[in-house]
Amino acid sequence: MTTATLQRRFTAILAFLVLWPPVHFALARTLDVNPWKLFGLAMYANAHEAKVELWDETREPAVRLEHESLSPATKKAVGDLMYWRGTLGRFVDVAPFAARMLKENPGVERLLIRFGVQRLDTATSKLTTTWTTHRYTSTSVP
């Protein structure tokens, strides 16, 4: 291996180590990317907990679907959503998971998915949960 090749590799590795931490920090702050994954260097400075709530809005009032009462296929869909959304944040589309959940539960015509991310609020030094809400109907998902 030539010296020029070693210099290029060293420069590429050094550039990655210098540029990735601020990019990862920005992604974690703006798009809820997990600071503990994807080579996040500030992982020990921040808590990250993802939560998913499912609500059946077909009934009045809306009924929360408890994890224990879900079918195994729906539990798998919820687990997959937790994993992927908990890791990649808002880069992951919720619609395919909602379609799987609605397909497995034909009695549910309107589904509300609440996804929460618990973070440390730097202003108050307290853990806060930020919730995003997604509504789907049996006709709105493919």
Image: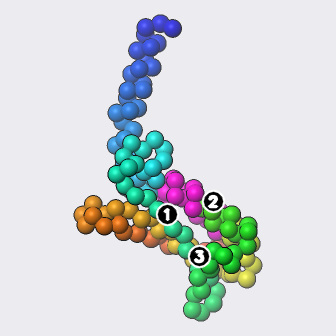
Residue that carries the numbered disc 2 in the rendered image: 80
Q: Is residue 75 magenta?
A: no
Residue that carries the numbered disc 3 in the rendered image: 54
Residue that carries the numbered disc 1 in the rendered image: 50
**Secondary structure found at label 1:** strand
Q: Is residue 132 above or below residue 11?
A: below
Q: Is residue 88 magenta?
A: yes
- Report the residue at 39% width, 38% height from top: 20
Amino acid type, callout 2 = Asp
Quarter holding residue 4: top left
Q: Which residues are magenta?
A: 82-98
Crowd tier of the residue under label 2, counting other residues whose Cα lies within 10 Å: few below 14, some 14–19, many 20 or above: few
Of 67 and 135, nearer the camera is 67
Crowd tier of the residue under label 1, counting other residues whose Cα lies within 10 Å: few below 14, some 14–19, many 20 or above: many
Q: Position of residue 66 (x, y in %)?
A: 62, 78
The Cα–Cα distance between marks 3 and 2, rounded to whole angstroms, is 14 Å
Tally the marks: 3
The Cα–Cα distance between marks 1 and 2, rounded to whole angstroms, is 12 Å
- Residue most extreme to the top: 2
Q: Position of residue 15 (x, y in %)?
A: 37, 29
- Report the residue at 69% width, 63% height from top: 76
Q: Position of residue 23 (x, y in %)?
A: 38, 43
